[in-house]
Image (cartoon, rainbow, N blue to C red):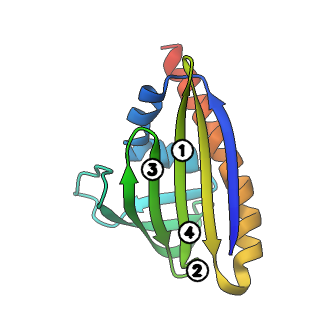
Amino acid sequence: MRTVKKTSVFPAPREEVFQEIQKLSTLQYIASPYATFTPVEAERDLVWSEGSEYDFRFRLFGILPMGIHRIRIKRFDRSVIASKEGNPFVPRWNHTIYLKEVGSETEYTDEVDIDAGWKTLFVYLWAKAFYAHRQRRWVTLLTAKKSQ
């Protein structure tokens, strides 16, 4: 097992970041183009909440099908969001997001425990790049909202 941890300060208050986290469109924006997530049940309204579970068609770089990625929300509040996730290629992808208010900004941390058997090192290296990318996309998203 390997752990990826990445922290950034976002140019928005924690409440605004928390509101954005609740939208599927935010996940899709910040993950692209490294990964795409398409809900298996397209007609179902996605509302992240503690105890909810969702299945997504996961594509690496939007091209390579990686099967169904399941996300089980274990905790969902304004300080900590924790999920147990996995797919056929990466059985353990446990993700925790920490949100800490810092004045008018938010310290945001992604922490992910990964276990993919013999593929773990390769997945870990991809995940390091992915979470750096996600956090850059977060800053872009929040900066654009601020200028509207």
**Which comes sooner in the sequence, label 1 or label 4?**
4
Q: Which amino acid does label 4 sit on?
A: Trp
**Which comes sooner in the sequence, label 3 or label 1?**
3
User: Label 4 crowding class (10 Å Cα cut-off): few <14, some 14-19, many 20+?
Assistant: many
Residue 58 x, y percent position in the rendering: 50, 67
Disc 2 vs disc 4: which is toward the camera? Answer: 4
| Residue pointed to by mark 3 | 81
Mark 4 residue element: strand
| Residue pointed to by mark 4 | 93
The residue drawn where x is 42% and y is 43% is 25
Mark 1 residue element: strand
Residue 148 x, y percent position in the rendering: 47, 14
**Which comes sooner in the sequence, label 4 or label 3?**
3
| Residue pointed to by mark 1 | 98
Residue 143 x, y percent position in the rendering: 58, 22
Q: In the shown orientation, is residue 26 left or right of residue 119?
A: left
Up-down: is 148 above or below 52?
Answer: above
| Residue pointed to by mark 2 | 89
**Which comes sooner in the sequence, label 2 or label 3?**
3
Q: What residue type is labelled 3?
A: Ile
Q: What residue type is labelled 1?
A: Tyr
The residue drawn where x is 52% and y is 16% is 146
